[in-house]
Image: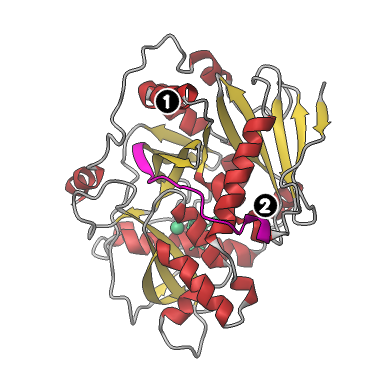
Amino acid sequence: MDSRRLHVTFPSSSTKDVHQFQKALPDLSEPAEIGCFSLSYVNETRREFHDDARGLRLLLRRPSYPLSLDLKEGFDTYKKFDEGARMNEHLDHFLHWILLHPQEFLFRKQSHKSRKKELVVCVRGSLTDLMMTPYEKNDGWIFVVCRIDGVLYLTKFETEQDVYRWENGTEEKENFMYWGYKFEQYMQVPPEDPQAFQGPINNSEGFHSVIYTKLSDTGILLVGEMDCLDPKAPPTTPAPFCYVELKTTKLYPGLDLSVKQTFLCGPKLLKYWAQSAICGVPKILIGFRNGDGVVEKTEEVATVKLPLLAKEASRHGLKDSVWKQEVCLNFLDGFLKFVGQVVAKDYDKAAYKFEWSPGKSGVNVSEEAPGSRWNFIPEWYLQSRPGQKVPVKKVREAPHGNYGENLLRSLI
Ligand code: A3P
Ligand code: MG
């Protein structure tokens, strides 16, 4: 067997029929940070793992208006990490963390096993893409899942469209990407430190939070890159509720500088919400830039407010901006349950490929041979993965509960 199409699909009706997901919100338990790691730049295709929080930055608030932050600055010294290499990392850094913290992993694994519920290991970006699927009009996706000792490992693979985009990126797109990273630097580095403030942008470094949450019955162990820590969060605030997501978006000329602009970010708001809501990041700080890449104003929005802004957008007839959180979460919930039912064989027998594109009504599934190109679990993990022989100790639900406090101390 190399590849065998399975005659199952999700959802039973079309993905375009969003009404099927318009039911009560599924239960999303409060996300808890159970650990963290940092990544640093080695070269344009390799990053180094650090079992600590060295990549975490503190948010440096500036006056929200008027501002003049030129995001174009320093583009000539940009150290860009290769997009293909980023995707090829799959779950590697996360698996590395699991090997170093076996009890944290085994405790969740055991707890789901005893309740006969699934546990999924993945990165936050995969969940964001899945949540946005009912509203996605341009980008398809490929996810591959395998089952190891009962646990589901899920990762994204590049589509032909992704590869085409990486290989044919326009200068304009490169600029937009750079601007997002430059904004992060402006909000994280004190202007009094000109060397750091004007230092080259490097989009491969970062701080990653390991989070456990539960969507209805499915346990999710996810890893998400956190942009910064909020110094205003009370010191006892448990992670991830002390983090802030940074975003940039175009400022629409001629409009009041009011919250109106926030929902005029349009369909982007869905991404902002999905990305932050799934891992409990409570706040998004948006930098509004003009067409020339200069941020003129910032605004902070609570993640929970975004679905309300989307509702407001629909009242203003902004059709592209209409989305509902229950549709996204019910889609994700249904899809993860579907995956749990389909992925029957262990990793040494098969991996399962789930493929969807906006032109298709449902997800195509195939069973792939274990040694095929869809294999993404490295041998070093298979050899050393935390197994049943290790005694399972009960660990605290959120060992980094006072993380915010510790980090603040170390950063200020
Ligand atoms: P903006 O979102 O402000 O444009 P994130 O916000 O997810 O932490 O990502 C930081 C920045 O990385 C983004 O800033 C954007 O510049 C760039 N980026 C991330 N994902 C991208 C994607 N899929 N396409 C283009 N740029 C992306
Ligand atoms: Mg960001």
Q: Which residues are magenta?
A: 19-35
Question: Which residue does the image show at 61% across and 24% down from the upper left?
Answer: 147
Q: In the image, what residue type sits under mark 1?
A: Ser
Please state the horizontal and vertical placement of residue 334, each as a whole percent of the image. Answer: 62, 44
Query: Is 234 included in the stretch rendered in magenta?
Result: no
Residue at the extreme front of the image, as rendered: 24
Position of 261 with respect to 378 (left or right) is: left
Image coords of residue 71 (percent x, y): 45, 69
Quarter placement of the N terminus: top right
Ligand 1 closer than 8 Å to the CB at disc 1?
A: no
Above or below residue 55? Residue 173 is: below
Q: Which mark is residue 111?
A: 1
- Residue drawn at x 28%, y 57% is 230
Is 326 above or below relative to 30? below
Determine the image quadrant of residue 65: bottom left
Query: Dot 2 corresponds to which residue?
Result: 166
